[in-house]
Amino acid sequence: MNFIEDRTYEKVNFQNEPIQVGEYDRCIFDYCDFSNCDLSGFIFSECEFLDCNLSMATLTQTAFRDVFFKDCKMLGLQFDVCNQFGLSFTFENCMLNHASFFKLKIKQTTFRNTQLHEADFTECDLSGSIFDNCDLAGAVFDISNIEKTDFNSSINYSIDPERNQIKKARFSAQGIAGLLDKYDIIIEDRT
């Protein structure tokens, strides 16, 4: 397997110039296009993806270890098939619509200013995570561990407290309706 470290890739379209399968350590991918690429078996350690498009990439046994994604388009990614050993990442200003985190243990993950429409967090362990100013419209939390998770500044979530572990999770007063959706009640703000 190829080992590449401390390298910067700028404006590379990996659909046209296929990236070599290997281990990428402390590499920076700036404005690169990975959309529809097969990244199966790749290892990314302490890498940064900036302004990249990874939509619909194949992630079978892909390893993301302490990886930072910023301003990335990441539609339809199946993180649930990634290599789970050391799996850790941070997302900032990303679009993660239709992503699947099914059954993953991703404690203390930070999602900042990120759109997560219809993302699947079913049976996911997100304890201690932060959803800072995220849009969670249609995101699924079912049998998930969101204990000590911070949703205080996020919007459009719908979480059933009876089907999820939510002890010490943080929610804003405005977002509390997202915990009562299943009851189909009307909540009026009289301030």
Image (tube, rainbow, N blue to C red):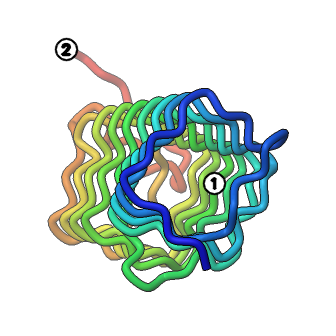
> Measuring 50% from the left and 49% from the top, which residue is drawn there?
181
> Measuring 54% from the left and 80% from the top, which residue is drawn there?
103
Q: Can you give x and y, in whole percent of width and height, for residue 52 in the image?
A: 58, 35
- Quadrant in the picture for residue 125: bottom left
Q: Label 2 sits on what residue type? A: Thr
> Measuring 45% from the left and 40% from the top, which residue is drawn there?
8
Mark 2 Cα shell of 10 Å, populated few (<14), some (14-19), many (≥20): few
Query: Is residue 172 visible in this depiction of the protein?
Result: yes
Q: Can you give x and y, in whole percent of width and height, for residue 182 in the image?
A: 54, 55
Q: Can you give x and y, in whole percent of width and height, for residue 131 in the image?
A: 32, 46
Q: Nearer the viewer, mark 1 or mark 2?
A: 1
Marks 1 and 2: CB-CB under 8 Å?
no
Q: Which residue is mark 2?
A: 191
Q: Is residue 135 above or below residue 158?
A: above
> Measuring 49% from the left and 82% from the top, which residue is drawn there?
84
Label whose residue precedes the other's in the sequence (1 or 2) = 1
Q: Which residue is mark 1?
A: 99
Asked which secondary structure carries label 1, the reply is loop
Q: Nearer the viewer, residue 134 or 6?
A: 6
Mark 1 Cα shell of 10 Å, populated few (<14), some (14-19), many (≥20): many
Q: Is residue 17 left or right of residue 30?
A: right
- Quadrant in the picture for residue 16: top right
Query: In the rendered image, which quarter contains the C terminus?
Result: top left
Q: Label 1 sits on what residue type? A: Ala
Asked which secondary structure carries label 2, the reply is loop
Alpha-carbon distance for marks 1 and 2?
A: 37 Å
Q: Is residue 152 above or below residue 106?
A: above
